[in-house]
Image: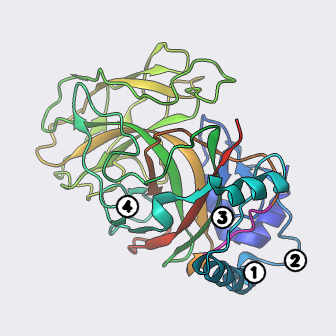
Amino acid sequence: MIHAARIERWLGKEKLEYLQSQMVGWYGPPIHIRDVPGDVFITADGDFIGNFDRGHFASAFDHLRDHLKQFWRRVERERLGKPIFGAGFTSLDDVIARSSQGFGQRLNGGMVAKTGPAAVAGSASSLWRVGTAPVAGAAGSAAPGGRAPTKATTGAMAFNNPASGTLHLIGADFGASVVNNAVMLYDRIFDVAKTMNSTATEAVTGVPTRYQSTTVTDPDYIGGNFLFIEVGGTALAATAHNWTTCTYLDQANAASTLPSVTGNSGAIVDRFDMPLNTWFCPLESGDSGIKALTQMQCSALVATGAINFVIGHTIGIMAMPVASPLLPQSWLSGTDITPRIFDNACLALFELPKPASTATTYSGIINVCSAAP
């Protein structure tokens, strides 16, 4: 376990407490925090685990200038055709070898840039429907079938499936225009558009194509799949409502019912239609993930608006404790704790509940590399 004081020194007290508050009620595995040097995960209890060699004396801001100098040197080396190395597998030598042999790549061709919507303080917001890189994604398909998005779906980050072995996230150089924001990198494995102005139950028959195993030790395990309810391109009418009764199949493929989720009257576009300071819907007690959604229902006739029910799987959190065009991290740690990215994954971002309503621009590079079979 990593002492919280070291994380606090690096990220700041406000950001530390913010991240811990976002894990209350989380039912999945620890989530990787990408913009912290080393390999740091936050657990459902708000503890930090993994490898972290910073935070003894200096903060992220103290290291920013040195990191920026290193980054621009790397950009210049790339321009001159020299290789850029990553890290994160069985050893540092292993990753250097894999990267220099052409197994490394950058998501979306080298640049990810999203300008978030005007938001509500304390609420999570989707970046699926906004540009510019990747381009804006579209609403989920209608019920009952819905859609199982892939990397070919408009709005997903582009990457190449490895010819052999498995692809892993190894680092990111990322920044935000507003201080103390954080984004979740996730695999958007299923989405479905809800019929509005209806209180009838609406069946969902489509299923995701990734993270569908009931075996705990399987990389494809259902545990950690989460549901969120996303406002699309039309704001909701000013009508109080709850999302109930909604049903799903759990990590053991057993029928379960979501606890009622309180929506937001008049919710604006791209906002999560869920209570403040939440980014995932609660599950039945003891459940750790959603295999598939089976039914949607709204408690009131919300006359206008657009809603998507989305199932995702976490890849990692990027927390920005300073406002910066770029916040690199020291990911040359030589460890083997690197989040897996499945072939054909639909990688996307959303804003974790925001500290302020200011629209925020996020941009940078996200590095991945394939490990040997």
Residue that carries the numbered disc 1 in the rendered image: 63
Q: Residue at x 44, y 56 (%)?
A: 350
Q: Is residue 152 left or right of residue 354?
A: left
Considering the whole magenta stretch, tell me its main secondary structure. Answer: loop
Residue name at image x 47 percent, y 63 percent: 109
Label 4 neighbourhood size at 10 Å, few (<14), some (14-19), many (20+)? many
Please name the residue shown 87% across and 77% down the image.
57
The mark that comes first in sequence, 1 or 4, is: 1
Decide if residue 240 is in sight here.
Answer: no
Contact, mark 1 vs mark 3 (Cβ under 8 Å): no
Q: Are marks 2 and 1 in contact (CB under 8 Å)?
A: no
Which residue type carries mark 1? His
Residue 55 numbered mark, or none: none
**Which-is-in-front pick, marks 4 and 2?**
4
Which contiguous range is marked in magenta? 327-332
- Say above or below: 268 vs 300: below
Q: Is residue 151 left or right of residue 200?
A: right
Q: Position of residue 54 (x, y in %)?
A: 83, 68
